[in-house]
Image: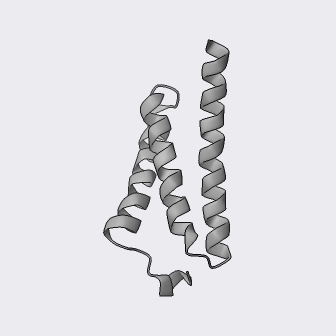
Amino acid sequence: MLRLLIVLVLVAHGIGHSIGVAGGGALLAGLDAWRALALASSVVSLVAIALFPQQLPAFSTVAAVVVDLAVMIGLLVLEWPSADAVGA
């Protein structure tokens, strides 16, 4: 059971990073998909933190939540950055 739990955590962690890397690549390529990928990465990160809150040092957990929320608020609420500013 513990092995399965560790595998699930590692897979979720890898998915979050993969989505984040894909978002960065999409932005570099000038694709609008970077916004959706950045949001998905933030959601995956927040879900992982919610499921396993004790797995990271407190500062890392707080910093990750702050960055995830900043990405979500920036993209969804403030509609920042503009497509003109980043070229996508």
Residue beneath the point at 35% across and 61% down? 73
Residue at 60% x, 63% y is 23
- Where residue 60 sits: x, y (%)? 49, 39
| Outermost residue, top side | 1
Would residue 35 appear left or right of 1 to someone viewing this image?
left
Q: How is the image coloured?
A: one colour
Q: Residue at x 63, y 65 (%)?
A: 24
Q: Is residue 59 above or below residue 37?
A: above
x, y (%) of residue 74?
Answer: 38, 66
Q: Quadrant of residue 10?
A: top right
Farthest-out residue, left? 77
Residue at x-position 66% and y-position 74%:
28
Q: Is residue 74 above or below residue 13?
A: below
Q: Is residue 25 left or right of residue 66?
A: right
Q: Is residue 12 left or right of residue 36?
A: right
Residue 52 on image: x %, y %: 48, 28
Question: Would you place residue 70 above or below residue 4 in this image?
Answer: below
Residue 88 in which image quadrant: bottom right
Where is residue 21, by image quadrant? bottom right
